[in-house]
Amino acid sequence: MTEINPQDLAARYVALWTEPDPGLRRDAIRSLWSENCTHIVQAPEEILKVAADIGFTTADLTARGYDSLEVRVSRAYEEFVAPGEYTFKPHGTAQRLEDVVKLRWEMVPVNGGEAAGVGLDILVLDADGRIKTDYQFIES
């Protein structure tokens, strides 16, 4: 496997979610993720309840491939970063164990203050060091 510095990967990963230029976001997605990538988000509690009410015992939100991932990242940018209230930043130290990287991030007010959201991502890398599967857990 390619040498990957987990801190650098975490910084590039989080920077993607705050990139205002759609073309640069698209390029960053293609440099960070493999072509057949999957981004899986643990569904928020309210979605899990709706799923349970209609008979599903689990629910996940999945983006597959570059186009789907680009929509996901762009929507997060438009909702949280573009209005100018929040930004994302790495939180703590990213760690790597063979082809897996664990990183944490937080969504913080641009003008300072407590984090409005915290997340954990478990990234499974391919042989070239690009993300093939991204498991995202929104922790708060």
Image (spheres, grey):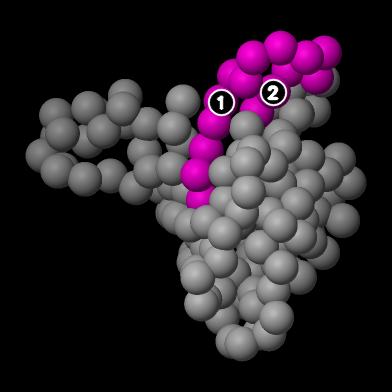
Work out whether residue 66 can be spotted.
Answer: yes
Counting residues from the start of the chain, the first of labels 1 and 2 encountered is: 2
Magenta region includes residue 72: no
Location of mark 1 (residue): 117
Which of the numbered marks, if any, corresponds to residue 108?
A: 2
Above or below, 107 against 11 in this view is above
- Label 1 SS: strand
- Label 2 SS: strand
Disc 1 packing (10 Å; few <14; some 14–19; many ≥20): some
At label 1, which amino acid type do we have? Gly
Disc 2 packing (10 Å; few <14; some 14–19; many ≥20): many
Q: Image check: 105 left or right of 134?
A: right
Find the magenta span and give its range: 107-121
Magenta region includes residue 115: yes
Q: Residue at x 78, y 47 (%)?
A: 15
Work out whether residue 132 can be spotted.
Answer: no
Q: Residue at x 22, y 27 (%)?
A: 49
The number of discs equals 2
At label 2, which amino acid type do we have? Val
Q: Position of residue 65 (x, y in %)?
A: 57, 67
Q: Nearer the viewer, residue 20 or 13?
A: 13
Q: Image check: 110 left or right of 35?
A: right
Seen as rendered, the residue at the extreme left is 55
Q: Position of residue 134 (x, y in %)?
A: 51, 59
Q: Image check: 32 left or right of 20?
A: left
- For the residues labelled 1 and 2, the Cα–Cα distance comes to 7 Å
Which of the numbered marks, if any, corresponds to residue 84?
A: none
Q: Are marks 1 and 2 in contact (CB under 8 Å)?
A: no
Q: Position of residue 16 (x, y in %)?
A: 76, 50
Q: Residue at x 83, y 49 (%)?
A: 22
Q: Nearer the viewer, residue 24 or 2?
A: 2
The quadrant in which residue 59 appears is top left
